[in-house]
Image: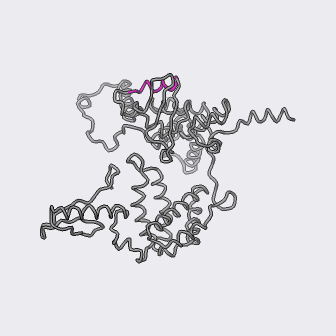
Amino acid sequence: MAQNGKVRIPSYRLHKASNKAIVTLDGRVVYLGEWEDEKSKAEYQRIIAEWLSNGRRLPDSPARDPSAEQTVNSLILAYWQYAKLYYQKNGQPTSELVCIKYALRYLKDTYGHTPASEFGPKSLKAVREVMIRADLCRKVVNDNTGRIKRLFRWATEEELVPPSTFHALTAVRGLSRGRSEARESEPVHPVSEAQVEAIKPHVSRQVWALVQLQWLTGMRAGEAVMMRACDLETSGKMWLYRPSSHKTQHHGHERVIELGPRAQKIIKEFLKLDLGAFIFSPADATEERHAEQRLNRKTPMTPSQTRRKPKQNPKRAPGDRYTTPSYERAIAYGCKLAFPHPTISKIKPRKRTAEQQAELVQWQKEHKWHPHQLRHSFATRIRKEHGVESARILLGHKTLSVTEVYAEVNREAVADIVAQLG
């Protein structure tokens, strides 16, 4: 697949020895007819169309022959080619593709060489047990099991396995809470305003602006980092932000985020002349940091340092936009500096014992928060002050049941009611 996300189409080529037109598909050379002849060009178009509709394989390719014995590995390979094309949004692979990769790794390691037709419910349960032993939480185990089922559903659709194989796998139910050895995932809780404010001195202006926007609007981290001026409607009193891509876009849902005066003030500081440029850029943050370092320099630069030119193609050049992982790492680094261990943080890393290092890691884990918690904090505040329906609308949820996951119940109000009732 090409880097821009489009499928690379094998070209119409000349075979010089025979002066015939050819195309190479699935490692096979297909002869089309006379070079530059209209019939050979039409044959090329027909074969390419069949090749694309069959998942970039020829219909008569041995790897796709239903009568041939398919192994689980061959199914994984074929499905991966399909998934790379299917799980894309705006020409970029989605996070689901990474999840599929890790789910299929467990399948490959345990049953890769098994004939696909022999992979049944007990085999799927065995793979699931391997995931439990790897200390994956129950929800992730269930999600990965579903992804493996999805592979066999696709293989059934492509007539690579008998329909009975997939139908048998559907009998495997998901793990229920408290009825398996799989651990439960820790719920996501809101983060306090004091914890948020503590990282301000330790992050860039751009990262702090993203944190404030999430705190004020409840938008997802992925929606905040991709903000551009062309996505903003600034004609009214309330600005409207329509992300170019969002989580439920493939369901046909529209996502509109209202930005009040405080959010508008934050964004205005970073607006650029290029309306298509990302508002919050790591490259801008790096440039500002370097400028501040030069300003605070205690010794003058030497002539050789003055003449030194920056690298033309640095290996780790800052990007033009933050990604959700890079934004999360910046917050984690800010938390590390904002909440140092009272004693161990003062010890140089090479002088720490293994026990001290383990204690430090646990301390940092307990004092770290991530961008998604800002959305939970927003939902909880809105529910407490304006009700759960307002929280649902502002979060962009279609149902209240989803909002209930984000907005924690106001226990103080419940306690007051109970006190009055006696």
Point out the image quarter for the N terminus.
bottom left
Point out the image quarter for the C terminus.
top right
- 95 is higher (above) or lower (below) than 80: above
Q: Which residues are magenta?
A: 261-271
- 214 is higher (above) or lower (below) than 181: above
Q: Quadrant of residue 411?
A: top right
Task: Give the farthest residue toward the right.
Answer: 422
Percent position of residue 155, x then y:
46, 67
Q: Residue shown at 26%/70% (left/top)?
A: 28
Q: Quadrant of residue 64?
A: bottom left
Q: Nearer the viewer, residue 332 or 225?
A: 225
Q: Residue shown at 48%/53% (left/top)?
A: 96
Q: Residue shown at 33%/64% (left/top)?
A: 50
Percent position of residue 178, x then y:
69, 58
Q: Nearer the viewer, residue 23 or 214?
A: 23
Percent position of residue 308, x then y:
24, 33
Q: Quadrant of residue 27?
A: bottom left
Q: Residue shown at 38%/29% (left/top)?
A: 288
- 350 is higher (above) or lower (below) than 278: below
- 403 is higher (above) or lower (below) than 45: above
Let me know if residue 345 is in the magenta part.
Answer: no
In this picture, residue 196 sits left or right of residue 245? right
**What's the magenta bit mostly, secondary-structure-wise?**
helix
Q: Nearer the viewer, residue 295 or 343?
A: 295
Total marks in image? 0
In this picture, residue 221 sits left or right of residue 415? left
In this picture, residue 175 sits left or right of residue 225? right
State the scheme by which the image is colored.
one colour
Percent position of residue 236, x then y:
48, 23
